[in-house]
Image: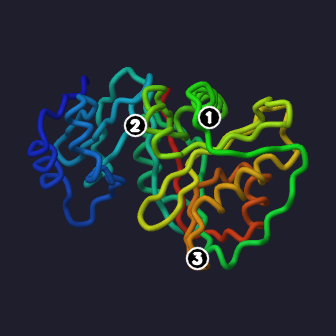
Amino acid sequence: MKPQKIENYEQYIQLVERYNRKGRFTNDYLQNEAADLIIHDRLFALCGQDNALLLVQKEGFYRVYYYINNTEELLVLPESELVAEILFRGENAPEAEVKWLEDMGFKKNLVRDQYFAKYASLTQPILIEGVKIEIATAIEDVLWAIRLFNTSFDKWSGDYISEGQVPLLIQENAILIAKDLDGNRLGALQFEMRQGACWLNHVAVVPEARGKKIGRGLTEAFIEQGHVDDSSRYMLWVQRQNENAVAMYRSKGFVPMNKSTLSMIKI
C-alpha cells in the first residue's frame, strides 16, 4: 500500500480526531512538528478502518507514528525501511503494541532511557590533559561533527542531522568539538536549549580516542554551556545497551526518569 501525502494541517487534525479514540495506543507526538513536515512534503498517512500510521520521510526510510484502536486489524505496509518507537515507563514496552508491530514484520532494535540532572547534583569536572574543547564556529568542524554523528549510530534509532543544518548549528553555538593539542579532532557533542532544559542530543568520539575520557570531557563542557545557576536542568537519552555511557552519566550524577523508548524496525 502506498502512503498518501498529507496536503495540509487540517487534514492532519482530521486524521487525529478520527483515530484518537478512547483506549487507543499511540506514539504520536508530532503536534509541534506536523505543520513544518507538511510544508516540506514529508508527512504521509496510511489508514485502515480502525488504525492509522503517520509516516515521516527521513533519509532513506520512514519514521512511523501510530494510532491503534484494534490490534486485530493489520495494515499493508509500503516496501520501504520503517522504524517505530514505543514510549513506555518501567522495564518493558507494552506487549500489545510490540505484538501489533511484530505481526506486521517489525523487529525489536534498541532501548533508550531518559536521564535528568540538576547542576547542583552533578559531580565536579575532571581535568583531561592534552584535550581542548570549544564551541565549533568553522564550517569544516561542524560538517565533521555531523558526519561523525551520522556514522556512529544506527540511522533508525538516532536522529540523522542534515548537512544543510550547518549554518543554524553555527548560529546557535550548538556543537562542541574536542581536539588534541595538535588540532586533531577527537569527538563532538551537539546540544540545544529546549523545554527549560539543556538537552544533550548527540555525542560521539572517534574510535582511536575512545577510552580516554573524551566523552566525559565533552559532557562536562556541555554542562557548563547550560549552566545558569544551581537549578539549571539537563536532559539526555542514552541507549541502554551502551553500558559505558550509562555508567559515565550515572557517575556524573544523572538519574533515570523512568521513561524509555523501544525502537522497532522493518527493513
Q: Element at badge 3? A: loop
The residue that mark 1 highlights is: 149
* Label placed on residue 5: none
Query: Which-is-in-front pick, marks 2 and 1?
Result: 1
Q: Quadrant of residue 74?
A: top left
Q: Element at badge 1? A: helix
Counting residues from the start of the chain, the first of labels 1 and 3 encountered is: 1
What is the three-letter code of the residue carrying label 1?
Answer: Phe
Q: Residue at x 78, y 44 (%)?
A: 132
Q: Nearer the viewer, residue 154 or 86?
A: 154
User: As displayed, is residue 145 above or below residue 111?
Assistant: above
In three-dimensional space, the C-alpha distance between marks 1 and 3, rounded to whole angstroms, equals 30 Å
| Mark 1 closeness class: few <14, some 14–19, many ≥20 residues within 10 Å | many
The residue that mark 2 highlights is: 63
Query: Which-is-in-front pick, marks 1 and 3?
Result: 3
Q: Residue at x 59, y 31 (%)?
A: 138
**Mark 3 and 2 residues: CB-CB less than 8 Å, in contact?**
no
Number of dots carrying numbers: 3
Q: Quadrant of residue 115?
A: bottom right
The residue that mark 3 highlights is: 229
User: Residue 169: where, in percent of width, then height?
Assistant: 49, 39
What is the three-letter code of the residue carrying label 2?
Answer: Arg
